[in-house]
Amino acid sequence: MQRVVVGLSGGVDSSVAAYLLKEQGYEVIGLFMKNWHDDTVTISNECPWLEDSNDALLVAEKLGIPFQTVDLSEQYKERIVDYMFNEYEKGRTPNPDVLCNREIKFDVFMKIALSLGADFVATGHYCRKNTIEVDGKPVHQLLAGKDNNKDQSYFLCQLSQEQLSKALFPIGELTKPEVRAIAAKADLITAEKKDSQGLCFIGKVRLPDFLQQKLQPKEGVIIEIPADAAIYNQSIPRFENLESELAYEAQNKDYSNSVGIVKAKHQGAHYFTKGQRKGLNVGGTKEPLFVIETDVENNIIYTGQGNQHPGLFKRTLFIQNSEIHWIREDLRLKSGQTKEVWARIRYRQPLQKATLYQFDSGMYVRFQEPQSAITEGQFVAWHEGEELLGSGVIS
């Protein structure tokens, strides 16, 4: 009998994953990951992980499977939290959920599971895995979940072949309503439980409050750039080759010499991210202000009015070679190669038509339509049909 360790989070998805595996005849063990218990970082008066671990325990008891809690908070702090602070300090916006899967659930946690003699690790993600043969070797595919509303393959876009080989996604073929119905029928306490919000570790915390505990506030100005500013009407230079054209399209605009209007003060450019609207606290404009660029070095935030402001849009982004990740290693592009794909730059964004261009210097992703708020530090993931082929960190 094959042994599977399920990451029971105290939510309905992982509960049903455990239930289904047991029905399928696996020997199932439930593990709850405790990732955070630093009380010096104010979260809120509620302590979500206590309630969650309790729910996970009740589910395990109901299913009659062994259960224990593992404390991964040290690794979590090192690999996720410290990384986040570093990225924000550099003016980048990390994605802790993608990292949490790569570094914690399918690495630290997976190693614990394998040390317990597990054949597989299972999670409650809405995605699917398929295995095909390429040149006589098994190759694992990461496929979108059947529920279009809930497809979570994006969060797993950094997994490796080795990690996928040990992964099971029991609810990938189901929709959320079906999952809830199974939980209700099996009388699991989590059947009606609301989906968790916020970062995958700190419960209900406002990000600026969290960041403020490590990154010192630093007063600077918020500048509004008008939509008809000269910088948006510059003539496009002539390019020697495609690479220099793509590099031109991918670069950020330099607003330092633009004529802008000082609107207000802020408490630190590193608390803000491109495309952000809330938290600027600037009134009196016809349309709401959006962040179009942050200058962390000079501590300036550039903004524009409305979600159609030209400063929000770009067609092309760049990924450094060291930050390109192919799940399908066998499809990795060589320098000079291109590939038509469907891509997204954030979770839940509908897939967009794009082309990958691999050069010696790195990879460009050029979208057919300009994209709003392409943000450094976030992940771009590319697909062919239902399959997620790879991803990279936007640089």
Image (cartoon, rainbow, N blue to C red):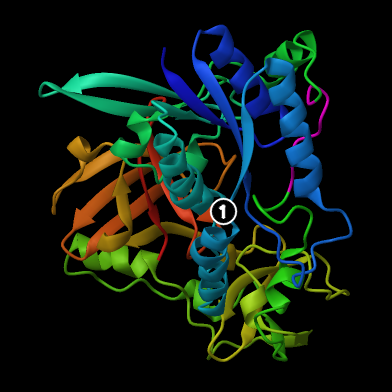
Horizontal side, residue 224 vs residue 233: left or right: right
- Please state, as top left, top right, bottom left or bottom right, where the N terminus lies in the image: top left
Residue 89 found in image quarter: bottom right
Residue 247 visible at all: yes
Whether 98 is drawn above or below 239: the answer is above
Whether 341 is drawn above or below 175: the answer is below
Q: In the rendered structure, which segment of residues is drawn in magenta? A: 190-197
Residue 50 image position (x, y, % from top left): 79, 46
Whether 133 is drawn above or below 240: the answer is above
Q: What residue is disc 1 on?
A: 72
Q: Main secondary structure of the magenta part?
A: loop
Residue 130 image position (x, y, % from top left): 36, 20
The residue at 37%/65% (across/down) is 249
Horizontal side, residue 347 vs residue 15: left or right: left
Residue 225 visible at all: no
* Helix, strand or loop under label 1: loop
- Please state, as top left, top right, bottom left or bottom right, where the C terminus lies in the image: bottom left
* Mark 1 closeness class: few <14, some 14–19, many ≥20 residues within 10 Å: some
Amino acid bearing label 1: Leu
The residue at 62%/26% (across/down) is 66
Residue 364 image position (x, y, % from top left): 31, 57
Residue 176 found in image quarter: top right
